[in-house]
Amino acid sequence: MCPPTYFDVNYSINEWMDPTESVDTTRANDQWQSLVDTYRRLGHRVHLVDPVPGLPDMVFVTDSGLVVDGVALGARYRSDHRAPEADHVLRWFVEHDVRRPTRPVYINEGEGDLLVVGDIICAGTGFRTDERAHAEVERHLRRRVVTLRLVDPRYYHLNTALGVIDDRTIAYLPSAFDERSRLTLRALFPDAILADESDAAWLGLNLVSDGANVVMAGQATSLAAQLRERGYRPVPVDMSEFLKSGGGIKCCTMELRGWVEPGERP
Ligand code: ARG
């Protein structure tokens, strides 16, 4: 995670961002800290990358790469505003001995568009990540990649339209995808939870789940109810200040899958 020290909205690269609206920095810091506290309370370990002045979106660290089996693929941003973030996170990978840290050739916004579900990686395209990056992901991380096309500009990253609940279960907003992708999703995940417009508008799908606890926007009440019905435990965290930038819980959280801290290796 990356502290929101320099978080602000001073450019606009998605429909949520209005640079004339002001950000309450204290509130943003408090909300972000409560997300960190929530993870720790649930028994997860949180590592931090240093925030960098002039990079107001760096708090959305998930977009800067994807780590699977302890192997890292870095990011390449579509917008020049965010481009330097990728280098800072790539350096973190190198310094912390994440294996094979590599800068991708094609535009690729990390876990913003690449979501691991069990053995496969669901990969978004349409707004940010270049479809050609999907084959690159497949080669570097040796996992099957399924391409999904996003069509609603409010849900410009895959992780705003689809949330991974466990190795077999996802939740998503059908209208955020083109018809072919909806067919793909229905075939792969016949038991998926279907979110509604209001869940999605609170970025309720921008969630982090450990398979039992689902850390998510509490305002997404119908999604929370569906999760509860299936035996999961929604854990509400309010990240409303970050909605001004089009970001939520998952955006602030990169998952380090299969990475063991150098000091703890045998
Ligand atoms: N302002 C950021 C952008 O538009 C928000 C990114 C949020 N991340 C996400 N995965 N949705 O790039």
Image: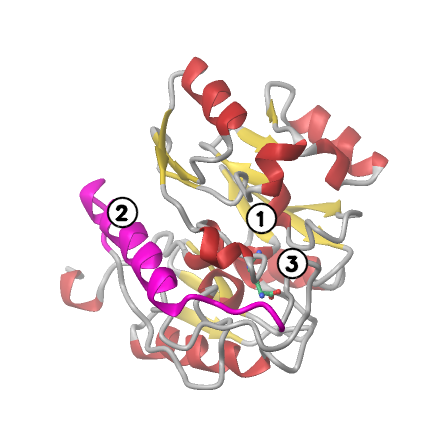
In reply to whether residue 217 is colored magenta, the answer given is: no
Q: Residue visible at 34% across and 52% down?
A: 258
Q: Which quadrant of the figure has residue 130?
A: bottom right
User: How far apart, in angstroms, are the residues tagged by discs 3 and 1?
Assistant: 15 Å
Residue 159's label in the rendered image is 1
Mark 1 belongs to which amino acid?
A: Asn
The answer, for residue 144, to whether it is visible in the render is no
Instruction: Identify which residue is drawn at 28% across, 51% down.
Output: 34
Element type at mark 1 = helix
At label 3, the amino acid type is Trp
* Residue that mark 2 sits on: 39
**Dot label at residue 186:** none
Residue 16's disc number:
3
Which contiguous range is marked in magenta?
20-45
Mark-to-mark CA distance, 1 and 2: 19 Å
Magenta segment main secondary structure = helix
Disc 3: residue Cβ within 8 A of ligand 1's nearest atom: yes
